[in-house]
Amino acid sequence: LNCVLSVCLSGFSPRGDRGGRGGGRGGGRGGFGGGFGDRGGRGGFRGGRVQFVHCVCVCVCVCVCVCIHSGVFISRGKEDALVTKNMVVGESVYGEKRISVEEGETKIEYRAWNPFRSKLAAAILGGVDQIHIKPGAKVMYLGAASGTTVSHVSDIVGPEGLVYAVEFSHRSGRDLLNVAKKRTNIIPIIEDARHPHKYRMLVGMVDVIFADVAQPDQTRIVALNAHNFLKNGGHFVISIKANCIDSTAAPEAVFASEVKKMSAENMKPQEQLTLEPYERDHAVVVGIYRYINITLLSALPWPAQVSTAFAMTHTNCHWQLCLNSYFRPVFR
């Protein structure tokens, strides 16, 4: 983005401040030739009645570079910013800054993503390796609130993806519905995430679950939804607020306890990251759900392959045996 800013400075010589003062003092006394000595003469020459207009052109170049995560970018300019490509050009969701960039004959608009208002943005700027949210992905967002972060997830997955946004509060749900009216890839669900059976008819299998529910039983809530909607080998991203789970324990102890609960639900944590300095006593845990190691299974005899896969996909009365997706490499 090339922006040209013209600044016109009236009554200033190329030397700026000193010429301006000379015009005020010497213009009247020596403006027509310096009749009262050197001081007036200098004033007439440097700041007399002739007004000079000096134009300064400043080119401000803003370069948008691709970040390590698909669909997430860094805007390089006077102030670097995390941005996503705006799916609804010309519309902002929460008053965020918009940046227009010309690429060839097309014009692309980006939206600034504030890490102080979004746990996912804070995790990205904090250096998380993978968020697993990419163009075309199907995402379930638990704790969608008014749709601030959901709108950026909508930008990332694009028109080919879907975002199932679950929010229990009716007040925040109204704002979420307004966001979804302009973004066709958001499906708002105003329901309690503790009861996934109430919206099971609305949601298909998803690739990623992102959770920011801030409840004492947060891991249980995520696990219930994962058992119903998250595909085998899918991923989860959970934002944990230590004070909401146990305000009397140290944050590190709370995080360790939650990670242990995840492992008991077939949710294998792969990465843990603090959200400092954007959020205090917060952490993000990224992991994989019901991971099946194809290499190990292929080394087993056929009856053992079936029984092992059946055991790995049977959890909490949720029966799922995906032979087509997981055993295709074995028979090649």
Image (spheres, grey):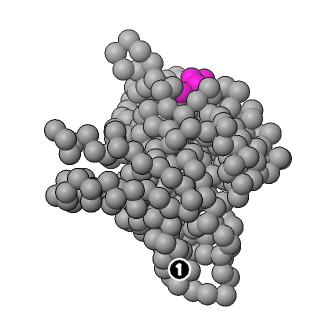
Q: Quadrant of the C terminus?
A: top left
Residue drawn 57% across and 74% down? 281
Task: Give neighbour class at mark 1: few <14, some 14-19, many 20+ (Cα, 10 Å).
Answer: few
Viewer-proximal residue among 189 and 55:
189
267 lies left or right of 173: left
93 lies left or right of 262: right
Determine the residue located farthest toward the right in the rendered image: 171
Residue drawn 67% across and 87% down? 248
Determine the residue located farthest toward the top in the rendered image: 105
Q: Is residue 314 above or below residue 163?
A: below
Residue drawn 64% across and 61% down? 221
Q: Does any portion of residue 296 appear in the rendered image?
A: yes
Q: Which residues are magenta?
A: 87-91
Query: In the rendered image, which quarter is residue 329 located in?
Result: top left
Viewer-proximal residue among 182 and 18:
182
Determine the residue located farthest toward the front in the rendered image: 303
Rendered location of residue 87, percent (x, y)? 54, 27
Rendered location of residue 312, percent (x, y)? 39, 60
Q: Does any portion of residue 121 appear in the rendered image?
A: no
Q: Is residue 240 above or below residue 208?
A: below
Residue drawn 80% across and 39% down? 174
117 lies left or right of 6: right
Viewer-proximal residue among 16 and 95:
95
Q: Is residue 105 above or below residue 186?
A: above
Query: In the rendered image, which quarter is residue 165 located in?
Result: top right
Residue 279 is one of the magenta-drawn residues: no
Rendered location of residue 7, percent (x, y)? 50, 29
- Quickly name the residue at label 1: 257
Q: Secondary structure at mark 1?
A: helix
Q: Main secondary structure of the magenta part?
A: loop
234 lies left or right of 176: left
Residue type, mark 1 in image: Ser
